[in-house]
Image (cartoon, coloured by chain):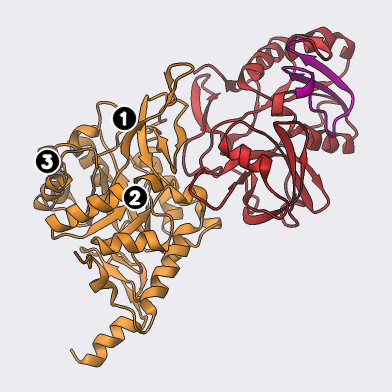
Chain colours: A red, B orange
Amino acid sequence: MTMQPLYDLPLTVVENIRLTSVTNVLVLDAPVIAPVIRSGQFVNVKVNGFHQPLLRRPLSVHRVVGSQIEIMIRIVGIGTQILYDAPVGTALQTLAPLGNTFGYNRDDFDTALLVSGGIGVAPMAMLEETLLKRGKKVVNFIGARSAPDVITRGLTNIHAATDDGSLGFKGNIVRLLAEELPQFNGERLRVFSCGPNRMLESLAQFCNERGLPCEVSIESIMGCGIGICYGCPVRVRGEDGLAHNQLLCQYGSVIDAKEIMFEV
Amino acid sequence: MTTMSISATHTDSHTAVTSNGQSFIATPAAISLGRGLDLKNPVLLASGTVSYGEELRSLCDLSRLGGIVTKAISLEVREGNLPQRMVETPSGMLNAIGLANVGVENFIAEKMPSLRTLGTNVIVNIVGKGVEDYAEVVTRLEDVEGIAGYEINLSCPNVKGECIIFGVDAKATSEVTRTLRRITPRHLMIKLTPNVTSIAEIALAAEDAGADSVSLINTLVGMAVDYRSQRPVLKNITGGLSGPAVKPVALAKVWEVFQAVKIPVVGMGGITNFEDAMEFFVVGAKAVQVGTQNFVYPNISEKIAVEVEGYFSRENSVKFSSFIGSLKI
């Protein structure tokens, strides 16, 4: 559990940038949260003041720019639709900072492979910036269904894979990583990842088999984001080697690939 | 008693010490639920929505509340159900957590020290697989300091073959209550499930067996289905419905039980703000519990407590005790 102070504040939308017909970036004025939020952490946002939808939406931070934070949204349901449509000036009640961080401060790697799938690119821009500041080399691997779904905002050094082959490598992102991995021979690598569970599972298996250090940022249904609803368990391998429930909002949302167990 | 002292109790605050040692501010909305469970105001945190208070305390001043009801405590450690455990539904949510908790021994060692410092009544929610389990947990907690009472969960709908058999059966409810009554002099609150034919009958059984109060409603059994995969959304298949969607059901059940029993009724189900809480008082709740809304606004209970106190502090306002059950038909 994070020992950072938590804030629950109304953040004003200062810009709504539509990236695609289903993906946008909300720029929020957040003078209190921007200086304290770290790469990999998330915020929990009430999308309106009504009972429908009832619960907040957990969203990773895309970037911090001065006193503003940016969150990237892909429409998957009513909550994200409201956020996609949010007019400038809207105040969104936001709980932050939540969860743990990516392991960007470690000194056991020099090259970071950022592997993302779909809306999993959202936290990568902040991670890349954080890593570059620490003198790390950053390479992005981005997977998506089709060319228009490949979002590269804030990212450099990109290798893309699409399911239909309309951009970059045709096939899934783990296969692309497998093909390109040899070029990093001799480098001290660490994989940072975010995306759909199926992708993360396959990536974690790939990395674990090769002894490649990997951490995954996991998405889950969440009720509260602070550990009181018990609604977001994930299966994590304990010291006894057995699977145990851990609440993602407290234990994660970044988890070591050797610990996370996807099969339920 | 002079007229002056009556008016003084109504409008002035004064400090007293309750039987469980908590300092007790007698606000204009202070209320006693009996057997030492004296509340500075009638707003409690509902079990299963606040864990053990640690996470909320930085976001909400829990000392402003009448009390906190802990996550259900069982004899053994319980990991709870596998994911997916919850799903949002129209103006509500379904959960099937499966009574995940640290078990009574860890609760005493790890959770009670922090709970004692909250400055509010600590009511421990208890769950068991059989009468013996309930009895053993309460016995173990009896010499633990800082506990104002127990809420007995006879009605969790999300664990198969366990507590559900008690809450839907008047005889079983009576048996558990009677057993615990013999063990503890502390306040015994029996939590009732709405998933029964006659909730008043169960409430009466609890009252006859020595319960000090009843709390209701626990969640309504519900289900969410994904037609594309033809699978239930929850791993447990069914879950408990809570949130604003259940408030009308809760109000009806509280009113029904209020008319049937003499012991205090603690109301809950979809309370999201001051107005909701006031509606429960009108239909007979002597106190309320705020649950699901803690997930949405972690400080909502404090806000409701302050507003309830404020309402009954106003010069021309009715006395809180006469407002309870004041429904005009």
Q: Chain of mark 2?
A: B
Q: Are marks 2 and 3 in contact (CB under 8 Å)?
A: no
Left or right: where does residue B44 sit relative to residue A224? left
From the viewer's perspective, is residue B269 above or below residue A142? Answer: below
* Quarter of the rendering occupied by the N terminus of chain A: top right
Q: Secondary structure at mark 3?
A: helix
- The residue singled out by tag 3 in the image is B170
Magenta residues?
A137-164
**Which of the two discs, 2 and 3, labels the residue nearer the N terminus?**
3
For badge 1, the amino acid type reads Val
**Could you say which quadrant of the image residue B97 lies in?**
top left
Gap in angstroms between the C-alphas marked 2 and 3: 24 Å
Q: Which mark is residue A33?
A: none
Q: Secondary structure at mark 2?
A: helix
Q: Are marks 1 and 2 in contact (CB under 8 Å)?
A: no
For the point 47% across and 26% down, which residue is it?
Answer: B83
Whether B326 is among the magenta residues is: no
For the point 45% across and 33% down, which residue is it?
Answer: B86
From the viewer's perspective, is residue B239 above or below residue B44? Answer: above
- The residue singled out by tag 2 in the image is B247
For badge 2, the amino acid type reads Lys
For badge 3, the amino acid type reads Ala
Left or right: where does residue B122 sit relative to residue A128? left
Question: Is residue B43 among what the camera can see?
Answer: no
Q: Are marks 1 and 3 on the same chain?
A: yes
For the point 45% across and 20% down, which residue is it?
Answer: B227
Gap in angstroms between the C-alphas marked 1 and 2: 24 Å
- The residue singled out by tag 1 in the image is B159
Q: Are marks 1 and 3 in contact (CB under 8 Å)?
A: no
Which mark is in front, 1 or 2? 2
